[in-house]
Amino acid sequence: MNIRLILVAIVLAGLFGCGSSKKTQQQVAPQPEWVKMRPSSATYYYGIGAVRKTMDVGQYQQAARQNALADMAGEISTNISSNSVLHAFESNLNFREDFTSTIKAQTQQDLEGYELVDSWEDLENYWVYYRLSKSQYQELKERRKSEAVKRSFDFFTSGVSEREQGNIRTAIVQLLKSLEPIKPYFSESLPVSYNGQEIFLGNEIFKELSATISNLEVVPVRKTLDVKIGEDLAQGQIAFETRYETQGRVSDIPLQAKYSEKPIRNNKLRSDGQGLAKFQIDVVRSTKTREVFTTEVNIDDMLAEAGADQFVRRMVHRFTIPKGTIAINIIRPSFSIESNEIMLGEQQTPGVLETSFRQKAIDAGFVVKSGNSDYTVRIMAVASPGKDGGQFKTVSLDGQIAIVNSNGTKIYQQSLEGFIGRHFDYKQAADDAFREARRRFENSFFRDIQEAVTKR
């Protein structure tokens, strides 16, 4: 009995399943022509979007709509006028690709007045179909372009006026601002009347912007500076003037500085009321003979103030940005040596440690000389007999090494102790003690002396 009921249930389930499948297939409408073949028209732009269906109906329908609008934006072609901003940059393929992508995104954002024509779906995919009147779109575009040109022209004339008044930073910022409203129309000529003549606005903005930036100069007060390792360079020494070709020194120009040895603090300044910007380097520690200090106009600061996007920034960075440089000549400090090295009661001239220091200093590029110097090395080392241990003779070495600067200030001191020499002969034992002291000096103490000199 149970087996018969199970068989009946299976048969019924199969029948219902077949019926459901047929019903689902019957609910799928025939594929419309616009899905099979994209329509074209002299009257409308079309946008068709398709996505795979998911459990979230609202999500996949919204995705299809966005795809359709993106498709429509891509259908709206962009022709590049020979009198346009973009034409001047057309040789750079990346610029054209970036512009096309930017304009497509802007066009999609600005689309208005489009209408839903149809939608269709099968078991796995969903399609949506929009259209937009070309005449309606063109009318809306021309209205927006006219408003954009007006805003841009106001910024442009303001920038030129500020430049004539000597406000160079403000002039550059205003000229940069004038680019933003017309960015969607960089491929068009944009003719306007200016001072009784017809100009192409985008091109004129870039011409005036380029001229304003190129006429700005960053001039070092000194072209070269000498500095010793371990010293700093104060603000009064590293100074730059900001000049404009027709006006001399100009103020309020943002600058950024770079020092080839290392990053510096406060590397961004604006020129003061006298058109000067003064930077500072802390302790110079370079092992090279020359470093370079470079200061250039901080165009990114003005681009940020103008609210320029990445596309405009890339275009502006093609200009030659004014900069100035100072050569920093690195002078190695000089040393003189006062050595008192005594081995078993006899003065050693030259001493083992004196000879070792001299060679290490010369190898490191320092100057070793007699008489006046930047630093004096004072070496005191005495090797004396110690307690004998059977057949071996023992000699111990004690003393100190000190470094004083030209003012007599001690900047380094190291005790010499614990150096022991053992041998059958006192002289050989003393030599061993000095060798141990020299090894420690070369492997450790000299490095500490370098750091004391260069990192004080």
Image (spheres, rainbow, N blue to C red):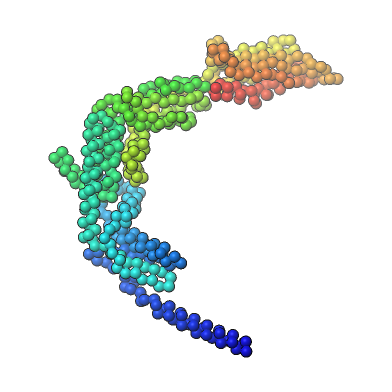
- Judge by depth and name the residue closer to the eye, 247 or 447: 247
Q: Nearer the viewer, residue 86 or 195?
A: 195
Q: Quadrant of residue 336?
A: top right
From the viewer's perspective, is 12 left or right of 295?
Answer: right
Tell me where residue 258 appears, x and y as whole percent: 43, 31
Identity of the residue drawn at 47% across and 21% down: 227
Q: Nearer the viewer, residue 309 or 319?
A: 309
The N terminus lies in quadrant = bottom right
In the image, residue 45 lies at what x, y percent? 27, 62
Query: Split into 4 quadrants, where in the image is the C terminus?
Result: top right
Left or right, 75 with reference to 354: left
Compared across the picture, whether 272 is left or right of 352 comes to left
- Image vertical order of residue 284 relative to residue 337, above or below: below
| Residue 399, horizontal then vertical, whole percent | 69, 15
Left or right of 414? Residue 90 is: left
**Which quarter of the picture shows residue 56?**
bottom left
